[in-house]
Image: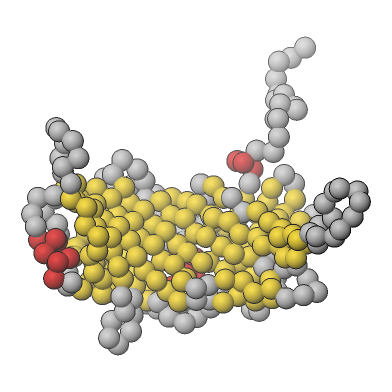
Amino acid sequence: MAFTGSTAGYQAGAQSNDTAIAYGLEQNYGAQATGTFQSTRFTGENFRPQATTQRPDEINADIEASQEVVTQTTTSGTLSGALSYGTYDDMLAAVLGADWNSNTIQNGAVVKTWTLIEKLNGKWIVRPGSFCTQAQITFAQGGFSAVAFDFTCKGQSIADADPATAYTAAPTGRIFDTVGNFSGLTIQGKTPAGCIRQVQITLNRNGSGADYGMGHADACGIRPGEILATGQLQFFFKTWDEYQLYAAGTQGPIAITVKDAAGNSYVFTFLNAALRNPQINAGSKNTTIVATFDISGNPLAAGGTFKIDRIPATPPASGG
């Protein structure tokens, strides 16, 4: 017998490496998108449907609980990933409620819902009416640049056939690391004297949620809420400059810049932010003191809370 080929039946179950996720913009809320879907990269997901049930308190001699009834079904979850250039621009646009304009996006009033499809174990999970309720971007020393997008969905179903007719491939750019790709942070144009340890940006659709009615268990529609931009900043404590900004209640721009190995950049900017809740403590001996501040984003007088600029690498000169 020739010892060639692969062994069959070795898997204990479906493999996560065979899973794929894509999305399509819906023309109408909850009406499944069709045509070409955009494939995306991800490190994990935890979507699931969850039923809300009620039991009438019927009086009976059987000493057992009454039959439950389903009152609504919610589907939600988080799509996690590693930040790379161009990969999550659509999701960032959705949570900010705007469209990209000349490589810039600023929070607005546009509402975007998606049909998310996930290939899993030979079938496709279809989640229409998917609304991004929060995006979190984390840059931390010792790790990669991480993203997490929370969604609430109208519902979930299983399809035997692929809902997409074609796919646009996901961007293939390098992941932003926090060593060579973290270009810096400024508070009102000035870089803190101590090295940055961690920055976290949270873009939340404050007050968003799904509405339910009778006759069906899934959502009737959504409340898009409002953009609320917050964050947290940690750096080695060397001067009192940032504390003085906190104490004075000073507001202004806070900008975080990253640039990948190919020269593509993002600039994430709180347009009018204040530093809040300082933590500057000598926690134990033989340690370097770290200053931690919360970031509270506020709108400018003319409007505008958060902005993202994407700066593509300069193309090579022609004829070279």
Residue sitting at the far top: 1
Query: For the C terminus, which image quadrant?
Result: bottom left
Reply above or below: 228 against 166.
below
Residue 289 appears left or right of 155: left
Q: Is residue 35 visible?
A: no
Question: Closer to the camera, 83 or 236?
Answer: 236
Q: How is the image coloured?
A: secondary structure
Residue 246 at x, y percent in the picture: 17, 65
From this view, report whether residue 307 is shown above or below residue 3.
below
Q: What residue is shown at x 71% (from left), y 34% (from top)?
A: 13
For the point 67% across and 68% down, the residue is: 154
Residue 83 lies, in percent from the top left, at 41, 54
Q: Quadrant of residue 317?
A: bottom left
The answer to which quarter of the image holds residue 239 is bottom left
User: Residue 225: x, y in percent?
Assistant: 50, 76
Q: Considering the image in quadrants, where does the N terminus appear?
A: top right
The residue lying toward the viewer, choosing from 203 and 293, is: 293
Residue 308 visible within the image: yes
Q: Is residue 109 above or below residue 7?
A: below
Residue 162 in the image: above or below residue 220? above
Residue 251 as seen in the image, left or right of residue 154: left
Give residue 108's position: percent from left, percent from top.
Answer: 43, 80
In the shown orientation, is residue 174 left or right of residue 51? Answer: left
Q: Residue furthest bottom?
A: 302
Taking the spot 47% from the left edge, 51% from the top edge, the residue there is 81
Residue at coordinates 28% horizontally, 60% vertically from top-left? 294
